[in-house]
Amino acid sequence: MNKSKSKLYSLTDPKHWIAPTIRLHGGGLNKFGAARHHLTTEKIDGVPVAELVSRFGSPLFVISEKRLRENARRLKRAFATRWPQVINAWSYKTNYLGAVCNTLHQEGYWAEVVSAFEYEKARLLGVPGNRIIFNGPCKLRAALRQAAEEGARIHLDSLDELYLLEEVARELGKIVPVAMRLNFDTGYTDPWSRFGFNLETGQALDCARRIGASSHLRLAGLHTHLGTFVTDTRAYAAAVRILTAFMDTVEEQTGTVIEYLDLGGGFASKNAMQGVYLPPEQLVPSAEQYAEAVCDALMAGTREREARGLTRPTLILETGRAVVDDAVSLVASVVANKRLPDGRRGTVLDAGVNLMFTAFWYNHDVRPVRRPDGIAEETVLYGPMCMNIDVMRQSIQIPPLSVGDLLVFNPVGAYNNTQWLQFIEYRPNVAMVLENGKVEVVRVREDLAVVIGQERLPPSLSLPFPEERDANV
């Protein structure tokens, strides 16, 4: 081999090695094959999308009652068949539309809330206080008093909150059962150390001892929440091992009997996170896989406890996105097209990140309602905001769309109807396709009266221009 040819085989030489890169590509014509057959979403639960838009306008959120109930039942069944005592609670912050919440309450889910507002919403919907789990780092006196009076499960987040609840319990003349939130390192997720009491530093054990010494508080449970969109089931198994070991320590040192372990939520949905190579079908565990990891670890961690004559603790889950995400779709209309300087096609929609806030983190599946004609090309989907960040999809391979064409985004049920913004555009109708095939509006589109309803204009500012004001003096 001569010198000139030897250079072709020098990539293993550290001096000449070049790091491999992954090039962004939407899946069009390339050396791996032709573009895939483009999927469409013509109907939602048997109802034509075009009919929904003609009745309720665009953009439009559409909830599937059928899918919501199916998801709720599957998750309940996965854990109930593996652990004898399970309480499923619905995470209000994920989607607190009344139709969503009450559908899940009908399926036996409690309410898990993190603010006085969410607590009031749950009570308004008819949830009794003793079926509410009250989490969160900001529980004020009035909310704590109501929760203590009504028998809610209060999960302490700080010592200041502990002291405040102790005062409230003293005023009420009650012994209030509480749980304490723990944070720790499982080795699989980044710990959310801003919430609760740290286990590794001894804060958690100090708090347990402090509650044990209280005349008005009783430690009834341990709570943790690993994070959001946790796709590694080993993280939950590790969390259970840590919780059960700490439970044994607390019971031994304080004489307290722990009645329940609350694992929080974090189960992922079949959504595609940006920057993640694997598709959600391969990355996201099933409800059964989550349940297997949790309950196997629980069985192992409580075996000796049962031998001591103590009952196994109740397991509490605070489920959100895994139940609701794919039960909600967002329908949007094309309002304009343009050619971008880099050659890509830009398509403007009437729905943006003001409605689908999760577009910042996920590449939501998006499908046209009718099969578009033409050759697929790389396209950017923009929203209606006059903000450069209003991008619904950075890159998608799709044939050219015409003004008026409809697109369906899914899954969008988690954290969009709670984080959406009244910014530039009105928030639209939300419709629910019921199991009986009927369609009901479960949240009415906003208008100017709704938006300005909370405003108060001082008389001195009633006229906008000085000359008009002076002319009326």
Image (spheres, rainbow, N blue to C red):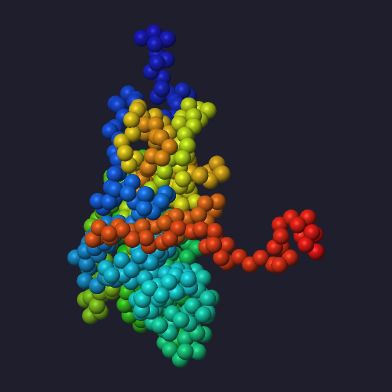
The residue lying furthest to the bottom in this view is: 173
Total numbered labels placed on residues in the image: 0
* Near-viewer residue (289 or 366): 366
Q: Is residue 226 visible?
A: no
Q: Up-down: is 460 above or below 170?
A: above
Q: Quadrant of residue 386?
A: top right
Q: Up-down: is 136 above or below 323?
A: below
Report x, y in % for residue 231: 33, 52
Report x, y in % for residue 449: 54, 62
Residue plotted at (44% across, 74% down):
120
Is the C terminus in the top left, top right, bottom left or bottom right quadrant?
bottom right
Report x, y in % for residue 321: 36, 57
Q: Up-down: is 402 above or below 30?
A: below
Q: Up-down: is 380 above or below 172?
A: above
Residue plotted at (30% across, 40% down):
40
Q: Is residue 352 visible?
A: yes
* Near-viewer residue (202 or 114): 114
Q: Is residue 144 left or right of residue 71?
A: right
Q: Is residue 32 left or right of residue 361?
A: left
Is the N terminus in the top left, top right, bottom left or bottom right quadrant?
top left
Residue plotted at (25% across, 79% down):
310
Report x, y in % for residue 352: 47, 47
